[in-house]
Image: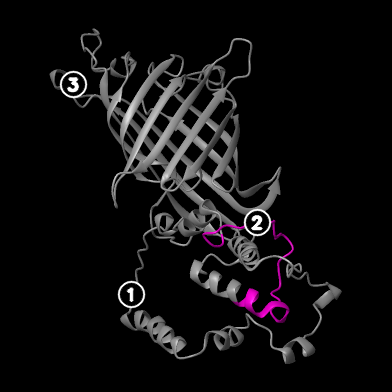
Amino acid sequence: MPFSRYLTPRLRIRRWWPLLCLPLAIAVKAQETPLEAREVAQGNILTPEDEQTAEPAEGGVIALWQLDDSGQSEAIRQENCLREQLVTAPANITLEEMRIRCELRVLRGDEYQEQTPIFATTPEAIESSDGPRISQRAQAIRDAAENPFTLASHKTNYLLPITYNPSPNKGGLADYDPDGLIDLDSIEIQFQLSVQVPVWRGFLGKASFMSFAYTNRSFWQAYNSDDSAPFRETNHEPELIMTWLNDWTLFGMQNVANQLAINHQSNGRSEPLSRSWNRIYANFVFEKNDYYLAFKPWYRIKEDREEDDNPDLEFYLGHFELTGGFEKGAHNVSLMLRNNLRSDNKGAAELRWSFPMGRRVRGYVKYFNGFGESLIDYDESVQTLGIGFELARSTGT
């Protein structure tokens, strides 16, 4: 699957024109030098003379070297190398540079030995006729972190011009309609805007990133012209996220990324319509071939009961989300599940399908059934079906 879909647009700001010309001059000069010679000059390849005269590490620390994979096929060896590079390479190394290094490693065999950091491992890979596979989510996270002055996608960004809700909640309109005279339409517009800004790269190793994120989900009675097309509900969700790329395997699946975040969610309303909560969550993302799985448990930060707008929110939203899905070609299907795991069972399920509608447009279908689609009606069971467009894909699940 091409990676260009996951690459984030770059905006580079430079104050002086000579600084723009300098990288170009270096790139032109590099084209005049054979590829292997450039790798040797940059220290990426040890020559036989260097290997004989290499000094041992200070303090008697024994260097850990890449495990011998000479018995594996060339495609598998390149895939193993690419996975390792995604975790260990500095974030400013491009995917093409990683491919070049891995091709050199495989072509030169035993003559090319690159030192591997202690925290990196090389999981077994499944050979593909399409060439070496690497984690699309890991690459998307790296691309987002590589652009510190760019807004990158966080959760999926979508616009659903047609969303059917047979019983929309009027609670969000109480300020505008105290007498309950507004007659809500069953067809409304739902959209989600979710962005993140990387703020710190490499705070705990080369494969770690920190970012601020914000998500806005709105429910808009756009076709209700008789009542001035009000916004029925808007939820705001700022968060601070710490992400670690990984390449461990568990039960045959590759753990490509782990996250820890501090999250606030509210509807920005005053009493008695205020809904909000704070939590700390972890997110563990796994992949295997075209399948992926994400487990997201959380802990709600306690508030004084007198100040808590919704003390029973956990009863309806539970303590975790489990998301699984698969990608086939340009199609992506996923299912999100929540449950409170109690005898008085409450939870939710959300089925999502994104698909191509042309070269630049993707379709998006979302079906929700359960509690907590929005904060204003978190304690009401709702069922909605939305059809529209996917504007940007998430960097996680």
Q: Of the residues shown, which amino acid type is indicated by label 3?
A: Asn
- Which mark is nearer the camera, 3 or 2? 2
Left or right: residue 36 versus residue 270 is: right
Disc 2: which residue: 125
Residue at left 63%, top 66%?
Answer: 81
Q: Quadrant of residue 232?
A: top left
Q: Over which residues does the magenta segment extend?
A: 104-132
Q: Nearer the viewer, residue 297 or 87?
A: 87
Badge 1 crowding class, 10 Å Cα cut-off, few under 14, some 14 to 19, many 20 or more, is few
Q: Which mark is residue 224?
A: 3
As shown in the figure, which amino acid type bears the numbered disc 1?
A: Arg
Q: Is residue 19 above or below residue 156?
A: below
Q: Amino acid at mark 2?
A: Ala
1 or 3: mark nearer the eye: 3
Q: Nearer the viewer, mark 1 or mark 2?
A: 2
Inspect the magenta stretch and tell me whether residue 108 lies in it: yes
The spot of residue 208 in percent (x, y) is 59, 56
* Nearer the observer, 223 or 328: 328
Question: Quarter of the image holding residue 166?
Answer: top left
Q: Secondary structure at mark 3?
A: loop
| Secondary structure mostly seen in the magenta stretch | loop
Look at the numbered disc 1 and give the secondary structure of its residue.
loop
